[in-house]
Amino acid sequence: MDFLRPASWEEALAAKAEHPTAVPIAGGTDVMVEINFDHRRPEYLLDLNRIAELSQWEVGEEKVVLGASVPYTQIIENLKTELPGLARASHTVASPQIRNRGGVGGNLGCASPAGDSHPALLASGAHVEVESQARGVRLIPIDEFYKGVKRNALEADELIKSVHIPKATGPQEFSKVGTRNAMVIAVCAFGLALHPEKRIVRTGIGSAAPTPVRAKEAEEFLNAALEEGGFWDNGKIITPSIAKQFATLASGACNPIDDVRGSANYRRHAVGVMARRTLMWTWESYRGNAEGRTLEGAA
């Protein structure tokens, strides 16, 4: 196994163009596990740790451009206001040591359905910025990024540079079921984000289908119910019947398997429970913020 160590982004793209089978490694929290267990034996490893721009982020007026190698710890400490859903998901990643090394780019590159960042990225409506030496830059909508079990939309000579994530304009939540409280792969996970400026809700489901997915029928039902009931304007409590139907439709979006971590039936049930709970949590937060704005305006 040869070790390629570019000093710049341009060198990294050139190395990937010359060696399309080279496996990128930054935090190494997924890749090294596969190598250590002999599940993967790549001809080349492409070390990206010397490329400083991959570990940086930029907060703009409407979005955050998050470098592919920004550690989860940095997201938790510095971006919990702009990206609350992703920050909550980052809290659940493994151990402090792994959160100090691992980043969203690695999750996307591996494309495991159990990756903790995927539900938050789907709920936020992110775009993945990738680049190749031959074709240049392209932005891939997160909905189009996952192609199959541990397969993504990257071409052989492309590398992930950053993720463009809209700044939160409303409450966001993330919930995860695991066999213990730390150092655990998700049995299933659910992310939800309110987008009041668009008057829509987006979701993300992890570890309950061959790829991370959105619960689109549940979103469509809830978006229609909130609009028809005037909930965005009047701030009423969401009725139990709406929450129950949303949970049922979210559960129906799953296509899980039975494995050592949980059965397919349990995953469907758990996703429904998480969908209902995260909806109530985010909506209560939205109502509280709306009431605060109303009182402030009256004063």
Image (tube, rainbow, N blue to C red):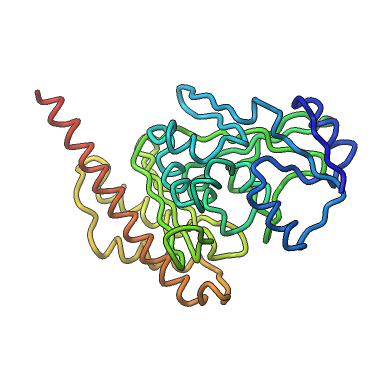
* Residue 173 at x, y percent in the picture: 38, 48
Left/right of residue 92 with respect to residue 136 in the rendered view? left
Residue 148 sits in which quadrant? bottom right
The percent coordinates of residue 270 (x first, y second) are: 41, 68
Which of these two is toward me, 158 or 224?
158
Q: Nearer the viewer, residue 196 or 285?
A: 285
- Image quadrant in which the C terminus is located: top left
Residue occupying the point 25% across, 51% down: 229
Looking at the image, the residue that sits furthest to the left is 299
Q: Position of residue 108 (x, y in %)?
A: 63, 47
Position of residue 225 relative to residue 106, above or below, is below
Name the residue: 47% across, 77% down: 265
Name which residue lies at 21% across and 44% down.
235
- On the image, the x and y values in percent for residue 126 come to 54, 39
Q: What residue is rendered at 24% in x and 55% in y?
A: 238
Q: Is residue 147 left or right of residue 64?
A: right
299 with respect to 132 (left or right): left
| Residue furthest right as drawn | 18
Nearer to me, 41 or 140:
41
> Could you tell me how many numbered marks the image carries?
0
